[in-house]
């Protein structure tokens, strides 16, 4: 179940990263914010970067957890073999 959680973290991170990229390359945002051009400029500049970095960090953490679980599983398989060899 832990690997599924790690993969889910990676996917969430990648989705957030893609949303951050689309934020800059996607369609123009107009409408009820038309009167707040300065606020909109600040939001456009900061939210996209925030999404990029958060997505990257979440994906990296999920990948790191995934690698760590694989290493721990390999070590868990080696430990019973080492215990069997010790009583000589």
Image: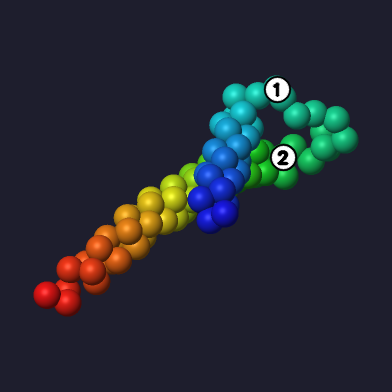
The residue sitting at 38% across, 52% down in the picture is: 70
**Mark closer to the chain start, 1 or 2:** 1
Q: Quadrant of residue 73?
A: bottom left
Does residue 68 sit above or below 36 in this rendering?
below
Does residue 51 sit above or below 65 in this rendering?
above
- The residue mark sitting in front, 1 or 2, is 1
CA distance separating discs 1 and 2:
14 Å
Which secondary structure lies at badge 1?
A: loop
Q: Residues within 10 Å of mark 1 (few under 14, many from 20)?
A: few
Q: Is residue 1 visible?
A: yes
The residue sitting at 57% across, 54% down in the picture is: 1
Does residue 19 sit above or below 63 in this rendering?
above
Q: Nearer the viewer, residue 84 or 11?
A: 84
Which residue in the rendered view is the most extreme toward the bottom?
87
Q: What residue is shown with label 1? A: 27
The residue sitting at 85% across, 30% down in the picture is: 31
Q: Quadrant of residue 23?
A: top right
Q: Nearer the viewer, residue 22 or 76?
A: 76
The residue sitting at 62% across, 29% down in the picture is: 22
Q: Is residue 48 visible?
A: no
Does residue 85 sit above or below 43 in this rendering?
below
Report x, y in % for residue 37. 74, 37
Q: Quadrant of residue 84?
A: bottom left
Q: Nearer the viewer, residue 40 or 20?
A: 20
Q: Nearer the viewer, residue 64 or 39?
A: 64
Report x, y in % for residue 81. 25, 63
Q: In the rendered view of the protein, which quadrant contains the C terminus?
A: bottom left
Q: What residue is shown with label 2? A: 40
């Amino acid at each position: 179940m832990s690997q599924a959680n790690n993969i889910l973290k990676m996917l969430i991170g990648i989705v957030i990263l893609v949303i951050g990229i689309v934020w800059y390359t996607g369609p123009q945002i107009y409408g009820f914010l038309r009167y707040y051009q300065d606020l909109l400029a600040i939001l456009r500049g900061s939210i996209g970067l925030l999404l990029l970095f958060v997505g990257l960090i979440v994906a990296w953490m999920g990948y790191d957890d995934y690698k760590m679980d694989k290493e721990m599983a390999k070590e868990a398989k080696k430990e019973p073999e080492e215990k069997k060899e010790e009583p000589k």
